[in-house]
């Protein structure tokens, strides 16, 4: 019995001719391969595992669009997008290591079980060499652990919890997206600047891991600047009507409400809070304010006009492509990389990409480039190529893939809901680009153990 | 003290939404005896009547504004809704602004028609089938309806705000002489509460005081006998189904400003509405309404910071915990009739 | 033989044969062909087929025999899974203690839930079980995070204690095994263009499934099973004869809870991860749908229903527009686009739509579930054999409840 942990179906698929003429059973030995799903034919298969059903289906659809665009660009079709602006120049439109890029798709349903089933089918059935995507931390952590066991690379999609590259980090997993800690560190100074250092905050926190880490991050960084946390109340994930959580806020003497919610929770709690007229109230002789630490433009659309004037943070925003002036008068020049990405995405699909699309596109390009630089698809070689990799030209300015926790460190955008949007996509305006130095932390603070890379086989 | 008052008020409002949904469900489930897993989908379709009307009223033509640029740097295409073009921005804007209340007028015929088609085309054939089959077919139907909506409207929530007139909240505390801002309540929620009261009242009056209602109530109690009396009970049950669908749909329309509707909002409410109906007791309309308000108020209390600090996680489970306690102390829920769905 | 009647032996043999040969049966299309998309013979899905088969068989012992509709069975599966993963974290990566502990813990939890819920019947019972399951889910997701891992769930880590296992080799990841036989190990056989995968984990799970199926047949045919059926047909009459039905229903509830725990333990053994979504009401609803879809009260029905739903979830959801274009590539361009546009809403992200339609079609046209479909086909063949014989067996009639 050949002892492989995951099959090498891709090999047979791509070199199908090899077995074509044989009528007798032959035993396929896996020892010939150095690592899981080593591509031996003229193509290489990537697995795009995104939510296609459930509340995050639209976000998943946008991720998928970005992946398809990335594959086109890698294969030399289209205008090349951010490959042209990327600081590393190994990608030349001939696929990855000269192999044409193919892909398979699956539905995570935003459930860890379904996401793992889908990822396993990509690895076992389709011979995928890398899995990427997802739009929640639960899914990211679950699939990352699977990829570690299976010996393939995982390039996380949208996942914001500290855990993904903190206590649950894995050697085979990488995250380009920012995290709760960075959101807190970037937001706090802007908030203190806009609302003063003497504020009383009331937190409503989604009652699960991501909520906890976000609340902690925002609390710590605002308290360091003099804010006081009056109360923090946990709300169930399945809650749809937040009225009973919002109604007591004014009585507590708080003058800022922080909504540590994401997705549908965020849309509903923000809508409810605005409905209660909180933003028209004066408390402690200050105007009452609301803060949403993690913004997603796609979801912000669901909250409609309620986002106007509300601060939050985001990983990337398409308006970077046009340049703008921040409220404090700083001129931010148009970013060539973002412009290239928005152009190729917008011309293909007719609307600007979301931050989820951006991070997924970047992850694909980063993986492809790492393989090219390493000269091998071997996960361990890829890990080595990505660890400590410094790059630029992917829309976020100079970025470091830190070796200690496989987390990207780059500038963080603090945004605010736009008062006078000119279109349905123009909901957020960047108020500050927080320099990376301000959001960098010691990799040991979240615990966890990276382990060592696993090439499978 | 005012914190408790606040949560009672809150609970009444939450409860009115629960009661309204449970009322529609109990008309079908508690009385016609059909386990209708598509009830949440009816609620959702009602909400999307509002979305559709809003989209319809905001249908726009595009003009190119060369002074502004879009995300690709091309001249911006500015959308102007036809109604604003025809009636001027003032009146046109007001029409779009009022699309949620206006949607009531659309939703009633649409929902009644949906109810009729559903009953005649599908449910009718399942009255005598086992409950298990009813679950499977209505669950299948719910998924299909949901996916159709998702196909046209996407998965993200769609903002459908209430008219500007109802923005903001009433300072209830200041009205009754308490400190300012101690008890505030959004105007739209008060509207929702009043609306729910009217609907619930009309359904009760209809069943209680009309001959039609009397026959239906008789039919619920003993379908065969009523049939033997030469009364066409089937036709009346169809009408009841239409009414139930309309109640669910109207609950959905009015709910859209509270939470932006999305395609799976029905599923989110489905389990809760079953719990409310069963806690109220099978076959009892007043029971369903009472249970709706009771669970709404208790849920509000459980979300108070003081309560959560005392019993962590209580806000996660309160509804189910209360359901268990009530069903163990009162075998047929609050006001259930003997022998309905007990086998 | 084995205490089974002739018909049951035949059924058992057929199931055993199908299970053993599943790697062949589920991979009918050659690799690289357009239809290979429909192949289901890869380890993960084969494992899921048998695991959800066990779950549904167990559920059917309660629902099919006694008529008690539990809407919270996923809680037992989830609790079993958590027990199993903790055994793997604390004791050993060997799957045996994990599976045993999963069954025990799920059994204990179902005694508690069953004892309380069975005080009511009908819809009241269903809501009680639902309430317990939803509470388990909500708590596991939130306040029990230290035990359950919350949103991100639990996975074995290199740093776990694992008292009975030796230290892991440098750089190795903990892998579930059966006395050293890795659950992920596969033996691959290529015949022509076909590739068949024989996975160790699958055969372990399949063996457990066959054992569970055997026990289920024995229960169905035993005096205990007849007693349970009596509960379904008329519990009151049974009580009047002086029989207390409660111990029987409770026993059935606990047995089916243990089946769920077994399924949960196996899930962890095959794929070492637990998340709380496993206990959400939709997961409980899924096993109800599996059982009804296949045919409640029949032996093989629930397994078929489980297979059908898992197949849709894993195969249909993976068909994207690119794949559709390659399928219809032989057609002229215009026609190709039209066909792709017509099929696309039903596959990939639209797989739920297909699932909903299948539910409705099955229940409308096959009141007895997939099993009735099978019976009708068999009857069709039989009738052909005996031309002229007009004794058409009436489709199973269902007494109105």
Image (cartoon, rainbow, N blue to C red):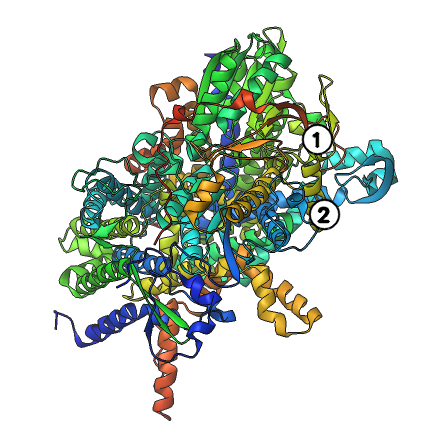
Residue depth check, mark 1 versus mark 2: number of the one nearer the observer? 2
Instruction: State which quadrant residue C75 falls in.
Output: top left
Between B185 and C315, which is closer to the camera in this rendering?
C315
Q: Disc 2 designates what residue? A: A350
Query: What is the chain letter for disc 1?
Result: B
Between A54 and B34, which is closer to the camera in this rendering?
A54
Percent x, y of residue A29 = 33, 65
- Horizontal side of residue B119 vs A21, given as left or right: right
- Horizontal side of residue B122 vs A339, given as left or right: left
Q: Image quadrant for the C terminus of chain C?
A: bottom left
For marks 1 and 2, give the CA distance: 31 Å
Residue A259 visible in the current orientation: no
How packed mark 2 is, by other alpha carbons closer than 10 Å (few <14, some 14-19, many 20 or more), is few
Mark 2 and mark 1 in contact (Cβ < 8 Å)?
no
Percent x, y of residue A386 = 49, 40
Any mark on residue B312, and which? Answer: none
Any mark on residue B163, and which? Answer: 1
A166 vs C248: above or below: above
Between B240 and B271, which is closer to the camera in this rendering?
B271
- Horizontal side of residue C175 vs A396, given as left or right: left
Q: Image quadrant for the N terminus of chain C?
A: bottom left
Judged from the image, the secondary structure of the residue bearing numbered disc 2 is loop
Judged from the image, the secondary structure of the residue bearing numbered disc 1 is loop
Q: Residue furthest bottom?
A: C388
């Amino acid at each position: 019995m050949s002892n492989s942990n995951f099959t090498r179906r891709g090999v047979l698929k791509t070199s199908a001719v090899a077995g074509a003429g044989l009528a007798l059973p032959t035993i396929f030995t896996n020892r010939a391969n150095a690592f899981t799903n080593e591509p031996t034919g003229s193509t290489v298969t990537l697995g795009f595992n995104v939510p296609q059903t459930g509340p995050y289906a639209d976000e998943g659809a946008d991720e998928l669009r970005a992946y398809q665009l990335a594959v086109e660009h890698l294969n030399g079709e289209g205008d090349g997008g951010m490959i042209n602006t990327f600081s590393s120049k190994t990608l030349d439109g001939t696929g990855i290591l000269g192999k044409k890029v193919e892909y398979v798709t699956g539905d995570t349903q935003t459930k860890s079980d379904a996401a793992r089933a889908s990822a396993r089918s990509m690895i076992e059935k389709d011979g995928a060499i890398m899995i990427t995507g997802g739009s929640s931390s639960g899914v990211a952590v679950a699939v990352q652990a699977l990829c570690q066991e299976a010996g393939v690379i995982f390039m996380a999609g949208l996942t914001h919890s500290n855990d993904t590259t903190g206590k649950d980090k894995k050697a085979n997993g990488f995250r380009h997206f920012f995290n709760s800690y960075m959101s807190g560190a970037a937001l706090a100074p802007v908030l203190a600047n806009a609302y003063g250092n003497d504020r009383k905050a009331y937190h409503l926190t989604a009652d699960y891991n991501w909520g906890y880490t976000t609340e902690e991050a925002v609390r710590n960084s605002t308290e360091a600047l003099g804010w006081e946390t009056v109360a923090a109340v946990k709300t169930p994930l399945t809650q749809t009507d937040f009225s009973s959580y919002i109604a007591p806020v004014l009585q507590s003497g708080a003058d800022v409400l922080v909504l540590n919610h994401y997705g549908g929770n965020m849309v509903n709690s923000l809508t409810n809070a605005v409905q209660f007229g909180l933003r028209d109230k004066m408390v402690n002789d200050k105007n009452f304010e609301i803060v949403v630490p993690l913004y997603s433009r796609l979801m912000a659309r669901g909250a409609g006009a309620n986002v106007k004037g509300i601060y939050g943070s985001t990983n990337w925003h398409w308006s970077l492509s046009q340049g703008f002036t921040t409220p404090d008068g700083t001129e931010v020049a148009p970013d060539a990389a973002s412009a290239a990405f928005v152009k190729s995405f917008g011309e293909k699909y007719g609307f600007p990409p979301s931050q989820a699309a951006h991070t997924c596109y970047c992850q694909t390009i980063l993986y492809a480039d790492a393989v090219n630089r390493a000269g091998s698809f071997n996960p361990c070689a890829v890990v080595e190529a990505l660890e400590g990799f410094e790059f630029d030209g992917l829309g976020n300015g100079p970025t470091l893939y830190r070796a200690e926790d496989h987390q990207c460190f780059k500038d963080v955008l603090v945004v605010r809901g736009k008062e006078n949007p000119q279109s349905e996509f123009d909901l957020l305006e960047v108020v500050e680009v927080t320099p990376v130095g301000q959001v960098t932390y010691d990799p040991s603070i979240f615990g966890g153990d990276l382990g060592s890379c696993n090439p499978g086989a | 003290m005012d914190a408790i008052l606040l949560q009672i008020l809150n609970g009444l409002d939450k409860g009115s939404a629960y009661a309204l949904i449970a009322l529609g469900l109990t008309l079908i489930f508690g009385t016609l005896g059909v386990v209708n897993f598509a009830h949440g989908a009816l609620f959702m379709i009602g909400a999307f009547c509002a979305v559709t009307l809003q989209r319809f009223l905001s249908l726009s033509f595009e003009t190119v504004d060369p002074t502004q640029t879009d995300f690709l740097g091309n001249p911006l295409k500015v959308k102007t809704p036809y109604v604003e073009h025809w009636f001027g921005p003032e009146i046109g804007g007001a029409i779009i602004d009022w699309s949620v209340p206006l949607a009531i007028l659309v939703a009633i015929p649409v929902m009644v028609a949906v109810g009729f088609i559903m009953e005649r085309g599908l449910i009718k054939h399942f009255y005598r089938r086992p409950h298990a089959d009813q679950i499977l077919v209505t669950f299948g139907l719910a998924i299909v309806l949901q996916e159709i909506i998702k196909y046209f409207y996407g998965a993200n929530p769609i903002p459908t705000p209430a008219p500007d007139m109802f923005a903001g909240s009433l300072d209830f505390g200041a009205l009754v002489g308490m400190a300012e801002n101690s008890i505030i309540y959004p105007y739209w929620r008060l509207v929702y509460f009043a609306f729910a009261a009217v609907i619930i009242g009309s359904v009760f009056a209809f069943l209680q005081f009309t001959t039609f209602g009397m026959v239906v109530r008789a039919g619920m109690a003993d379908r065969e006998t009523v049939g033997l009396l030469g009364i066409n009970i089937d036709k009346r049950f169809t009408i009841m189904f239409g009414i139930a669908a309309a109640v669910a749909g109207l609950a959905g329309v009015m709910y859209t400003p509270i939470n932006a509707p999305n395609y799976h909002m029905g599923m989110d409410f489905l389990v809760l509405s079953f719990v409310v109906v069963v806690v109220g007791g099978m076959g009892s309309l007043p029971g369903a309404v009472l249970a709706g308000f009771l669970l709404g108020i208790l849920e509000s209390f459980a979300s108070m910071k003081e309560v959560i600090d005392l019993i962590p996680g209580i806000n996660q489970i309160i509804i189910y915990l209360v359901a268990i306690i009530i069903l163990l102390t009162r075998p047929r829920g609050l006001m259930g009739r003997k022998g309905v769905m007990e086998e | 033989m084995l205490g089974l009647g002739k018909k049951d032996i035949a059924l058992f043999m057929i199931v055993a044969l199908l299970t053993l040969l599943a790697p062949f049966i589920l991979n009918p299309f050659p690799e690289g062909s357009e239809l290979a998309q429909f192949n289901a013979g890869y380890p993960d899905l084969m494992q899921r087929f048998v695991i959800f088969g066990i779950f549904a068989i167990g559920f059917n012992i309660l629902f099919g025999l006694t008529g008690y509709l539990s809407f919270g069975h996923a809680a037992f599966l989830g609790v079993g899974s958590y027990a199993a993963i903790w055994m793997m974290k604390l004791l050993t990566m060997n799957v045996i203690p994990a599976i045993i502990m999963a069954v025990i813990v799920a059994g204990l939890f179902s005694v508690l839930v069953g004892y309380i819920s069975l005080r009511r019947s009908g819809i009241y019972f269903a809501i009680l079980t639902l309430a317990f399951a939803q509470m388990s889910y909500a708590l596991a997701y939130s306040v029990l995070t230290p035990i359950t891992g919350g949103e991100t769930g639990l996975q074995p880590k290199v740093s776990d204690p694992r008292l009975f296992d030796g230290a892991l080799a440098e750089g190795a990841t903990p892998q579930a095994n059966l006395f050293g036989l890795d659950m992920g190990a596969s033996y691959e056989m290529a015949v022509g263009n076909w590739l068949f995968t024989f996975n160790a984990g699958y055969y372990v799970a399949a063996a457990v499934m066959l054992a569970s199926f055997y026990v289920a047949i024995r229960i169905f045919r035993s005096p205990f099973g007849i007693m349970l059926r009596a509960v379904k047909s008329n519990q009151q009459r049974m009580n009047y004869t002086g029989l207390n039905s409660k111990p029987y229903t409770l026993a059935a509830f606990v047995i089916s809870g243990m089946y769920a725990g077994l399924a949960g333990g196996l899930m962890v053994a095959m794929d070492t991860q637990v998340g709380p979504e496993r206990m959400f009401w939709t997961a409980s609803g899924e096993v109800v749908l599996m059982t009804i879809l296949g045919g409640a009260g029949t032996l093989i029905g629930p397994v078929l229903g489980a297979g059908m739903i898992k197949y849709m979830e894993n195969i249909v959801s993976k068909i994207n527009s690119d794949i559709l274009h390659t399928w219809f590539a032989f057609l002229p361009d215009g026609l190709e686009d039209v066909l792709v546009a017509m099929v696309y809403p039903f596959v990939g992200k639209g797989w739920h739509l297909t699932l909903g339609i299948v539910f409705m079609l099955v229940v409308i046209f096959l009141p007895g579930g997939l099993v009735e479909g099978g019976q009708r086909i068999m009857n069709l063949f039989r009738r052909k054999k005996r031309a002229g014989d007009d004794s058409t067996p009436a489709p199973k009639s269902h007494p109105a409840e």
